[in-house]
Amino acid sequence: MVTDADLYRRSSQYQKWSFTKDQLAELLAKPNRNVPPHELALTVQEEQQLILYYAAEQVKSVCQQFKLPSQVRATAISFFRKFYMRYSVMEYHPKLILPTCVFFAAKAENAFMSITTFCDSLAKTEPSQILDLEFLLFKTLEFTATVHNGLRPLHGFFLDMQTVLDTFDRTELCSIHDKAKSLIVDSFVSDVCFLYTPTQIALAALMEVNELAATQYMAQSMDGPNTSLDRLLTLIHGCRQQLVVNLPSQEEVKGISKKLSRYYKDTGSEGPATKKQRTN
């Protein structure tokens, strides 16, 4: 029988955007090393802190402004993080890339809005800025726009748990589901989507919210001849430890942003608003 895990392993996300921890660390550091040395150049850590801030706070802000669903937010964050596995913030400022990621994610998740409506609601954002970058973004994504996350398998587990876990009432299971969903949404900015499958992320969120319910559910529904419960629990615990990300402080972000602005000024870059797009 073909399982959800089998189907996921055939997806472009698994084939192109799933890594080991070492592979991911190398991909995150490589764009920074490709930038010519400069006294004002950001370190790898500074770049990652800035990217994390924009992914967590600014993508959320724009999605909330347009009342976009969680799936769009997840996809926009995925697009944003993948872009900066290929380019440095010293090549393309996050303020330039972020609106394009949100707009393209909205289209990818069938929450389309006109480019005029989108840009009119964002300060200093022109339609040409979004459209000129769309192809570069899509090319950087290796022409893959489908993003899988833990929300869909979580819903499936919630429906199944109502049948399997007769010791938990519906109200309690609903509370577990809602808390796990919130945790998964917050984990969009973490590395787990590049290291674990959506099913594993959903189980890890359930484990974090209610370890007893999650453990009982896995023991009753997933322990069989083709599945080692102990091995699964070890894997889920590893994912669970990485769900929550510590965001940089406002002061840290402010300092890094100022350093990046000085870098743009000192190197003669045109900056985030007017930089010519390189799509070749």
Image (tube, rainbow, N blue to C red):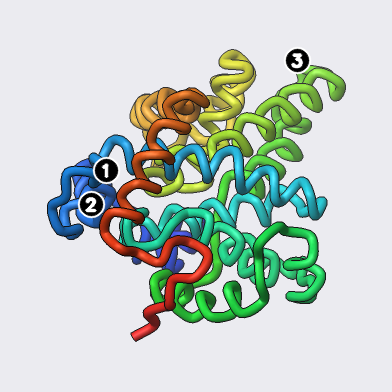
Which circle's residue, 1 or 2, is located before the other in the chain?
2
State which quadrant residue 75 falls in: bottom right
State the image coordinates of residue 138 (x, y, percent, origin top left).
47, 75
Q: Residue at x 49, y 81 (%)?
A: 135
State the image coordinates of residue 244 (x, y, percent, origin top left).
49, 26
Q: Is residue 210 left or right of residue 250?
A: right
The reply to whether the C-beta atoms of the residues labelled 1 and 2 are less than 8 Å apart is yes
Pick whichever, 245 or 102, lies toward us: 102
Q: Residue at x 26, y 59 (%)?
A: 267
From the viewer's perspective, is the residue at label 1 or at label 3 nearer? 1
Q: Residues within 10 Å of mark 3 (few under 14, many from 20)?
A: few
State which quadrant residue 141 falls in: bottom left
State the image coordinates of residue 234 (x, y, percent, origin top left).
35, 25
Q: Residues within 10 Å of mark 2 (few under 14, many from 20)?
A: many
The circle on residue 42 is 1
Of all residues, the one furthest to the left in this rendering is 37
Q: Is residue 158 left or right of residue 39?
A: right
Secondary structure of the residue carrying numbered label 1: loop
Does the rendering let one see residue 2?
Answer: no
Three-letter amino acid code at disc 3? Thr
Pick whichever, 142 or 158, lies toward us: 142
Q: Residues within 10 Å of mark 1 (few under 14, many from 20)?
A: many
State which quadrant residue 66 falls in: bottom right
Which circle's residue, 1 or 3, is located before the other in the chain?
1
Secondary structure of the residue carrying numbered label 3: loop
Residue bearing mark 3 = 167
From the viewer's perspective, is the residue at label 1 or at label 2 nearer? 1
Q: Quadrant of the C terminus?
A: bottom left
Q: Is residue 199 left or right of residue 262?
A: right
Residue bearing mark 2 = 32
Q: Residue at x 76, y 46 (%)?
A: 64
